[in-house]
Image (cartoon, rainbow, N blue to C red):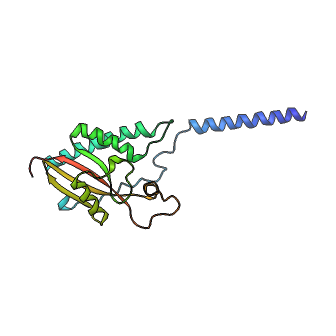
Amino acid sequence: MKSRISASLCAAAVATGVLCVTFALCGEPPSDAASPPKSKPKVAPVKDSDRVSVAAARERAKLMHDIYDTTLDVMHRHFFRRDRAVLPARAMEDIFADMARQSSIQTRWISVNTKAMSIQHEPETDFEKQAAKEIAAGKEDFELVEDGYYQRVGRISLGGGCVSCHTNQFSSPSTSAKFAGLVIRIPVNDQ
């Protein structure tokens, strides 16, 4: 008799659990009226120096669209895979390559004040070597117009996870700020 009651209680518990899960999965999500209103993203105030011509805005919007579209594609290609993970900086190199094919704008990483993780990341040209020195010394960016290209290297701050690999200091964090550089080369008409 006890086993029948236990079996009945167990069956009832399982049925109740299945019913609860079914209701939870089939239930409607809370309405927007019940959830707190989402705040709009904060946008920096527009300064007069931020304003550009409609033609320049059109070019920037197209370029930004291409960058975001390519980024989304690369993120899905690299990060939603079960077989392996890809470092974000490595995935970005695919974005650089796709954007170069679409726009003739060349982009690459360079090491500044840490070990290069690839020989491809060593500063190669005199411009890149000078930019690495300037950024290591504290500048935000370094630029030059030369041989039909506007070239800019901007500082990329390396966080804790980046620094531990780039400096091989896994146990003790670095006491000084570490940077990489992002080189962007855009063909120009005038010099």
Q: Position of residue 23 (x, y in %)?
A: 61, 37
Provide residue 188's location: percent of width, then percent of height.
13, 47
Q: Residue at x 73, y 35 (%)?
A: 14
Name the side, left or right, on which 171 lies relative to 18: left
Q: Which residue ends up furthest to the right in the rendered image?
A: 1
* Residue at screen point 67% across, 35% down: 18
Q: Give the residue at x 56% y 38%.
A: 27
Count of marks overlaid on the render: 0
Q: Within the image, what quadrant is residue 41 found in?
A: bottom left
Considering depth in this image, is 24 or 89 the residue closer to the camera? 89
Q: Is residue 52 visible?
A: no
Residue in the picture at 34% in, 43% down: 93
Would residue 184 appear left or right of 178 to someone viewing this image?
Answer: left
Q: Is residue 153 left or right of residue 24?
A: left
> Residue 68: x percent and y percent?
31, 43
Q: Is residue 98 above or below residue 153?
A: above
Which corner quadrant holds the N terminus? top right
Taking the image as shown, residue 141 lies to the left or right of residue 23, namely left
Q: Is residue 70 visible?
A: yes
Of residues 131 and 2, the one nearer the viewer is: 131
Q: Position of residue 70 (x, y in %)?
A: 32, 39
- Give 120 or 41, whichever is nearer the viewer: 120
Q: Residue furthest left?
A: 190
Q: Nearer the viewer, residue 173 or 157?
A: 173
